[in-house]
Image (cartoon, rainbow, N blue to C red):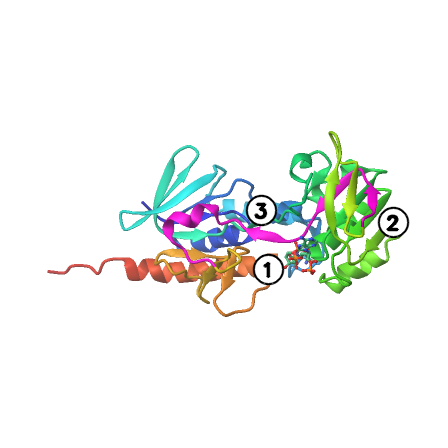
Amino acid sequence: MTDLIIVGAGAAGLSASLFASRYGIKHLIFGMEPGGQLNNAQMIENYLGFPEITGENLKNKFVKQVESYGVGIDTRKVVGIKAKNNGFQITTEKGGAESKAILLAMGAKHRSLNVPGEEALIGHGISYSPIADAMDYRGKTVALVGGGDSACTGAIALAEYAQKVYLIVRKDSFRAEKQWLDKVLATDNIEILYKTLVTQVKGENWVENITLSNGKELAIEGLFITIGQVPAVEVVSEIGVALNNNGYIIIRPDCTTNVPGVFAAGDLTQPEGGFVFRQIITSAGQGALAVASIFQYLHQRRPEPNWS
Ligand code: NDP
């Protein structure tokens, strides 16, 4: 049995692995897509020490630093976590492992519009990753839904390749960082449609048009959906970790959950009664904090030596 299993290899999980290595905590780290949401980030301008760095480059730096301690990221999918032998057992699609403590750092996955036509056209003109897919839409007319940082950074990336980008925002304002919004407003081929929702997506084998809440139809060749995330907590049901009404794992300031030995960090958490700010830097910080807490847990858990 190892000391710790980290489930998730995004900013929180990778940072936790680095700190675990430095604290001498034997651990395994699982993550199907090392880097997590960094894989969808184009230019990052708010990670201290790196005024401008691509998501890909920052991910590579994170992974390299983690691996420099001899830790390999296991890319098998974790399909279950349960209590076993005074510790925990995780199962993957092929095999499993046991540990004294668990850190849940699976992050979040994209939210869907849930409108008719969406599901059938995913991968056929509908994408949740504008930054990764922008190059495929050179010279085309596309639409992107959302009003946060993902929407603005996605629209900026798309506008470099697409001929026209409709940015569809449900309110009359954005909630994105001013830096990004200013860039959006200064980009000629982005047209913002405020107070508008997408109500239907149509297309035979590829997206052809969308219906808007004002009844109009818009002919497009690609639809990008960046309307926030939902926490990726499917595998935690069996261990009884408490979730809030929106499905986020409730944590205390020390990253403990309601289940002794189970800790959580990063985008899938909601601090008890606290403020949340989901950024790469806060996830990385939370991963480090969680490990300090896990270190204490493992030491308290160790049986006292028997001198008699
Ligand atoms: P957010 O949750 O911040 O924003 C989601 C946006 O989608 C909001 O504008 C919301 O509208 C809108 N929305 C939600 N549901 C619907 C719907 N059904 N139909 C239409 N619009 C909808 O998500 P993001 O992915 O943008 O960002 C997530 C986190 O990641 C944030 O903390 C963000 O700061 C961070 N991030 C930071 C980046 C950076 O470079 N600093 C880049 C990308 C993400 P409303 O405002 O009306 O609720």
Q: Which residue is mark 2?
A: 189
Q: Which residue is mark 1?
A: 278
**Picture coordinates of residue 239 (x, y %)?**
37, 50
The secondary structure type at the circle numbered 2 is loop
Quadrant of the rendering where the C terminus is positioned: bottom left
Residue appearing at x 52%, y 40% in the figure: 32
Q: Please name the amino acid that badge 3 sits on.
A: Gly
Q: Earlier in the sequence, mark 2 or mark 1?
A: 2
Q: CA distance from mark 3 to mark 2?
A: 30 Å
**Picture coordinates of residue 54 (x, y %)?**
69, 49
The label shown at residue 43 is none
Quadrant location of ligand 1? bottom right
Residue at disc 1, CB closer than 8 Å to ligand 1 = yes
Q: Which residues are magenta?
A: 215-243
The secondary structure type at the circle numbered 3 is helix
Q: Which residue is mark 3?
A: 36
Residue furthest out toward the front: 215
Q: Is residue 96 left or right of residue 270?
A: left
**Picture coordinates of residue 244 (x, y %)?**
48, 60
Q: Earlier in the sequence, mark 1 or mark 3?
A: 3
Q: Does 208 sit above or below residue 267?
A: above
Q: Earlier in the sequence, mark 3 or mark 2?
A: 3
